[in-house]
Image: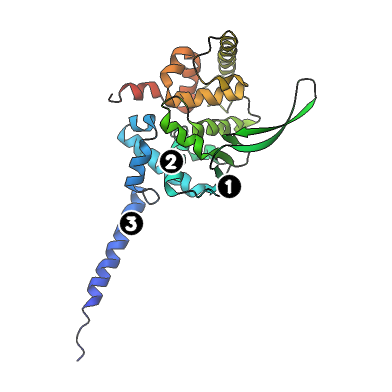
Amino acid sequence: MAAPRKSAPRRNARVNGRLKGLLRRRQSGHDGISDATWSRTLRTSRYARSLSGPDRQRLRDLSNHLLRAKSFSGAAGLVVTNAMRTRMALHACLPILNLGLDYYADWASIVIYPGDFRVHDEYMDEHGVVHSEIMDLCGQSLSHGPMVLSWEAIRAEDRTPDDHDLVIHECAHKLDVLNGDANGFPPLHADMDGREWARDFQAAYDRFCAALESGNGNTIDPYASEDPAEFFAVASETFFTAPDLINEKFPAVYTHLQRFYRQDPCRHLSREPA
């Protein structure tokens, strides 16, 4: 009689172990982002760190879903790593944490350049004259098209602790165009008043532009004065990075953003340990 083979039980044990590990990862929603990568990525967002444990778990799950739903590609020779994708996913998911990934259903890809990129733009002024210009940008959100980002600009946020968040800024543009042109008026929830939104945002925008012209605009990024769409995008990124600034300078805008994003960053960050 042939001797029994000794390797089968060990092989089966290894296979069963791998299957159980895979099942645990799938059940926990962590199959795309390792614990080490997630821990490092959390350091890039003070607001994400301030969330409760359950909310951070929801953010991680949502980030995993976004990583599976969107394609990430490098341009101009840039190699996009898993850490880079995870960072962009976390920041992109912060605005929709309580809204859901369906808010990003109209676009499918993120293109990352090593640094600023050059685009050719045409626009019509108020007199009907078409102008053409070449611009160097660090971010761009094309309607129903890809989101384009500068990795250098994203990394610079680590070295300059201020109110900038390029990914959130461009995601705000994506939300803005869900109901038409980029005009600082995203699709509001049923319990929100569009007239109040338009009135308060326009008043804040006008006051901000006037303060800049008089040399007293040292509040949010001056780029917010470009047009109402940029004001909404800058206000949104500041809402998640320096919410006290929005709440102090533009309290009505803060209230609208709080109701739109269904989040209260001031409350979360006030509980964060020093």
Q: Going by the image, does 93 lie left or right of 127?
A: left
**Residue 54, position in %: x, y?**
32, 36
Residue named by callout 3: 23
Q: Name the quarter where the C terminus is drawn.
A: top left
Q: Residue at x 32, y 32 (%)?
A: 52
Q: Secondary structure at mark 2?
A: helix
Say if 22 sits above or below 7 in the image.
above
Amino acid type, callout 1: Ala
Q: Nearer the viewer, mark 3 or mark 1?
A: 1
**Residue 142, position in %: x, y?**
63, 37
Q: Secondary structure at mark 1?
A: loop
Q: Residue furthest top?
A: 214
Please tell me which of labels 3 and 1 falls first in the chain: 3
Q: Residue at x 31, y 53 (%)?
A: 24
Q: Residue at x 57, y 21 (%)?
A: 224
Asked whether residue 190 is in view, the answer is no
Q: Secondary structure at mark 3?
A: helix
**Residue 271, position in %: x, y?**
30, 23
Q: Nearer the viewer, mark 2 or mark 1?
A: 1
Residue named by callout 1: 76
Please tell me which of labels 2 and 1 falls first in the chain: 1
Residue named by callout 2: 87
